[in-house]
Amino acid sequence: MRELLEAVADGSLSPAEAEAELKGYVTGDAGRFDAARQQRRGIPEGIFAAGKSAEQVVALVETALETTGRALVTRVTDRQVAALESALDDSFPNATVDRRSSTVHVRTPAFEPPSLDATIGIATGGTVDGPVADEAELVCEDAGATVDRVDDVGVAALDRILDQLDRLRDADVLVVCAGREGALPTVVAGLVDTPVIGVPVSSGYGFGSDGEAALAGMLQSCTVLSVVNVDAGFVAGSQAVLIARAIDDARD
């Protein structure tokens, strides 16, 4: 305790960092940020931007950077990203902002990314599934896993998935995103001996176009796979990271 107080007094530790050390979380006007989740759960807290103002997103990202050195933000809008980049020019001018679709990964130069001796494969049925896969991919990259991305291999033409089979089989765990009837994860799971996490995507049209048909199809899979909620790329990526970390520990 005394060391923390002395560090705050001499300026080597910010009040937010001290609060994170003492409580595990930091409380601000935009809410509480769980700075200890990485140590407790093995996955950092993701900042869900939908429904938040640009100012709230900025505040939470700055708290994340101050206490953990990086921030993962999902479901961002162009306005939120513009406000974030403008604010970071002043508060963290050397921060790196990596945006893919509606997901943003921000890190400071001081952040030391981990390294996992594991490969996570990510596959999509079509281009429209890309944003959900992007969300999963950034989570996996943040954890230090090697990511092998295979896009546009939907079951409408099975040759597209069969000619990528060696890559899929080389992965330690697979995240497979698909809309419409959600058949791709079921097909992949029948061809590989690695864990498969199916992600139903709210793409397509007609009955079940909001992802319900894809979710139902994956839940009814004859082959063994795990299934997350509709469009839950962050959850799928996090689950893949936990599996990859266990594999990395076993290899060590």
Image (tube, rainbow, N blue to C red):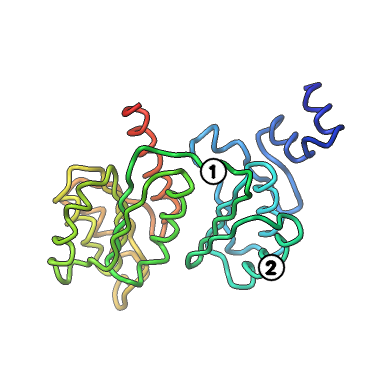
Relative to 149, is 13 on the left or the right? right
Residue under pointer 1: 44
Q: Is residue 123 above or below residue 204?
A: above
| Within-10-Å neighbours for mark 2: few <14, some 14–19, many 20+ | some
Relative to 192, is 143 on the left or the right? right
Expressed as whole percent of the image width and height from the top left, the position of residue 239 reads 39, 44
Q: Is residue 151 above or below residue 174?
A: below
Mark 2–mark 1 distance (CA, rounded to whole Å): 23 Å
Of residues 16 and 10, which is closer to you in this image?
Answer: 10
Q: Is residue 82 visible?
A: yes
| Within-10-Å neighbours for mark 1: few <14, some 14–19, many 20+ | many
Relative to 5, is 129 on the left or the right? left
Can you name the residue that lies furthest to the top here?
Answer: 2
At a point 71% along the width and 55% down the height, the residue shown is: 92
Of residues 224 and 82, which is closer to you in this image?
Answer: 82
Of residues 225 and 130, which is closer to you in this image?
Answer: 130
Disc with the residue nearer the chain's start (2 vs 1): 1
At a point 19% along the width and 59% down the height, the residue shown is: 164
Quarter of the rendering containing residue 94: bottom right
Element class at badge 2? helix
Return the mark for residue 52.
none
Amino acid at dot 1: Pro
Residue under pointer 2: 83
Q: Give the quarter of the figure containing the N terminus.
A: top right
